[in-house]
Image (cartoon, rainbow, N blue to C red):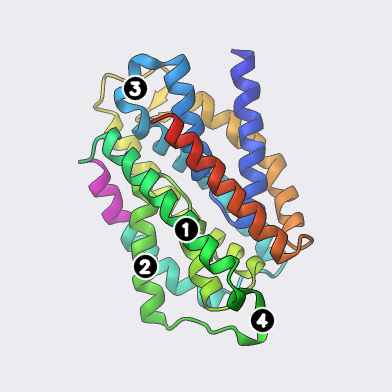
Amino acid sequence: MLFLAVCFIITGMIVGILSGLFGLGGGSTIVPLMMVFISVYEPSFSANAMHIAVATSLFVMIFTSTITTYSHHRANNIIWRVAIPIKYGVIIGAILGAILASFLSSKVLKIFFIIFLIYAVIKWAVKSFSKKSKSNNISQRIEPKMALSIIYGGFTGAIAVLLGIGSSVMIVPFLKHKNFTMSQSSAIAAAVTPFIALLGAITYIVTGLSDSMLPKLCLGYVYIPATVGMILGSLIGVPIGTRLSVKITPIIQNIIYFIFLIIILIIMLVNS
């Protein structure tokens, strides 16, 4: 049990650093690791593995994304006039995604998650390492129109709640396409993630209360021991990631983020 507690805390630290550095809520890290944990230590609950992983991820994300948003706000990294319209769309999309998630099996959610990661890796590679991307600078930034922000935010909210991920994997490429810097994109993504996490977590808790085939110490589909350990670890990791986000060059950030997505994709494919 002590070993697992340490693993959860270390995972939380990693999630916190990635959250501060890239605006990630942590879902793309937590979901695969929770899948591995369940397959090794709680194989009898594999039928609900993806629901437990997603729910736990969203609950942890409430705290990590809120702390990250506060840190970025203090550092003046968030452009609120861009973040607020996206937030409105995210709230609508998160509600719709949460309703849809209750009708899907863990296997279907897992397939969607893998497909989404493949899409994210390809899109990120094309955008981040293209000649056009390397030549862009901050003076060329184009702020998206409100209607587009709301629509894209809605799509992001629905996908994020379904898969237990933060908004970074969707919003950061979207804003970088508009020539926002990595720090600005990550900060805006972090600012809208708490709404996704809160709505999604509540839904998974409520729908999981009626499921009797869950491990002990679960609140709905949320696995409490993992949640507590990861939140404690994230309190250490988030400030580190936020400081790194303004010190690491955009090129290095792109490389780190791309490698991170590849690793997570491999873990999910191996565990499928």
Which labelled disc corresponds to residue 122? 1
- x and y, in percent, of residue 74 in the image: 71, 64
Say few, some or many: other residues with alpha carbon within 10 Å of mark 3 (under 14 / 14 to 19 / 20 or more). Answer: some
For marks 1 and 2, give the CA distance: 25 Å
Q: CA distance from mark 3 to mark 1?
A: 30 Å
Q: Which residues are magenta?
A: 94-102
| Of the two numbered discs 1 and 4 in the rendering, the one whose residue sits closer to the viewer | 1
Q: Find out whether the residues at labels 1 and 4 contact each other: C-beta distance under 8 Å.
A: no
SS for callout 3: helix
Could you tell which of marks 2 and 3 lies nearer the N-terminus? Answer: 3
Q: Position of residue 46 (x, y in %)?
A: 34, 22
What's the mark number on residue 132? none
**At numbered mark 4, what does the secondary structure look like: helix, strand or loop?**
helix
Residue at 52%, 82% (x, y): give it.
Answer: 143
Disc sitting over residue 46 in the figure: 3
Q: Secondary structure at mark 1?
A: helix
Name the residue type under label 1: Ile
- Disc 2 residue type? Gly
Is the residue under label 4 in contact with that under label 2 (CB below 8 Å)? Answer: no
Q: Nearer the viewer, mark 2 or mark 3?
A: 3
Residue with the mark numbered 2: 89
Q: Which residue is mark 4?
A: 138
Sooner in the amino-acid sequence: mark 1 or mark 4: 1
Task: Tell me residue 52's x, y (percent).
Answer: 38, 31
Q: Residue at x 24, y 48 (%)?
A: 99
Residue shown at 56% from the left, 74% from the top: 80
